[in-house]
Image (cartoon, helix red, strand yellow):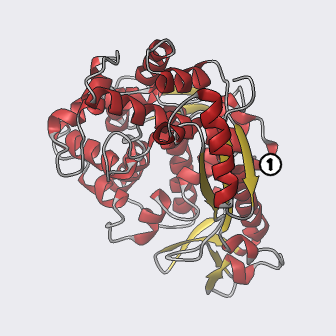
Amino acid sequence: MKKLKLFNDPIYGFITVKNPLVFQVIEHPYFQRLRRISQMGLSYLVYPGAHHTRFHHVIGCTFLMQKAIETLRLKEVDISPEEEEALLLAILMHDLGHGPFSHALEGCFVQSMGHEELSLKFMESLNEQFDKRLEMAMAMFKGEYPRQFMNQLISSQLDMDRLDYLKRDSFYSGVAEGNLNAERLISMLCVRNDQLAIEEKGIYSVEKFIMARRFMYWQVYLHKTGLAAENILVKIVKRSRELIRAGKEVPMTPVLGVFMKNELTSESFEEKYLEAYAKLDDTDLIHGMKAWCNHEDFILSYLSRSIVNRRLPKVVMSDKPFKRDEIDHIRKKIGTRFGIDKTELDYLVYSGEVSNLAYKTEPTGIRIALKKGETIDIKDASAYAGIDGLNQKTTRYFLCYPKKGT
């Protein structure tokens, strides 16, 4: 690299990439694919501005990681140049395994493999391509590096991933409650007994961070309309596979066909499938849904039109599970209205549950470094009466079915 590489980010301004290996990874096709993966799935059907990508997010995470390294070094925490490079690479590559529409289709294309495991597959491949120079980064990603605070910078209750996605998703969705001062939180990072901690004066900033996480989950990530849309997307994939198995023609891009025609698991996921997965992105599903709007199969065409034309179902939310007779009554009405049998009704009438846990103390919570030297959990350090409530999982139930006239 003969000159500095700059990214102009709407959140942080100019982001400088100084490390040649980091930039080479960014330039790799595996990484460039993230430009075509939506950060927030189908949330743009609720919040029109939420069209940012995983590429935006991981570049932002890398910027915050560089800030964290600088802060810790100023506080006399020893971080070698090799460790710095590994930290940057680990956070840069942590989302490589996301598939189309990110979390919306998690586990749909490769059963029993989440995006973290797929990210590791990509890292292993890149490690071979870059002469084993990613070994330390992979150890940090897996939480196996001997210095625990470095693993926690990658994945913990207060890692660079969460600091970026809350601030970024708040910005693009326009939901101000999620906006937090990530750089102020980073400025108060410290290390005590090899554990990442926040200085005592940062208690209020940590409280704000936890509250922002709670607000963003209920208002954005678990918004009822977004939930309905993402459930429809999963059902579109399921219906397409059913039709393919039945010998029906379902037009799609070749790379999407690889994952729709093969039932892949972690055991059967060979190198050739990784190369195919590296080409799979949102556009394959969008192309498919546009074509399927006119498919001869009523269920597939109806569901595809629901997404493409934003004709989404009615969503009822409740603090208690829906009664079986209530669901059966709706199923009967919808079955009569559309003239479909009981097995197909599951595509149009469905229920489920979602949970929100803003903060958890296990296995490692957010530690506050007291002035006298010891560290305690934020829930013990905070004077905010509601902090214990944020450590409790809240569950809500939803029921979806077609609106009248759709």
Q: Is residue 397 above or below residue 303?
A: below
Q: Is residue 391 left or right of residue 58?
A: right
**Residue 82 horizontal/vertical position (percent):** 32, 53
Q: Is residue 93 above or below residue 188?
A: above
Residue 207 sits in quarter: bottom right
Type of amino acid at the residue the image marks with label 1: Glu
Q: Is residue 371 left or right of residue 104?
A: right
Q: Is residue 21 above or below residue 356?
A: above
Residue drawn at 25 percent across, 23 percent down: 247
Report the number of discs: 1
Disc 1: which residue: 177
Please name whichever residue, 201 or 219, is drawn nearer the observer in this view of the structure: 219
**Residue 100 horizontal/vertical position (percent):** 44, 32
Please name whichever residue, 44 or 66, is drawn nearer the observer in this view of the structure: 44
Q: How many residues crowd around disc 1 within 10 Å: few (fewer than 14), some, or many (20 or more)?
A: some
Q: Quadrant of the C terminus?
A: top right
Circle 1 sits in a helix, a strand or a loop, which is it?
A: helix
Residue 20 sits in quarter: top left
**Residue 146 horizontal/vertical position (percent):** 33, 71
Residue drawn at 81 percent across, 74 percent down: 386
Q: Is residue 289 left or right of residue 89?
A: right
Residue 168 visible in the picture? no
Please name whichever residue, 245 or 355, is drawn nearer the observer in this view of the structure: 245
Q: Is residue 382 left or right of residue 11?
A: right
Q: Quadrant of the N terminus?
A: top left
Residue 237 visible in the picture? yes
**Residue 285 horizontal/vertical position (percent):** 44, 24
Residue drawn at 31 percent across, 48 percent down: 111
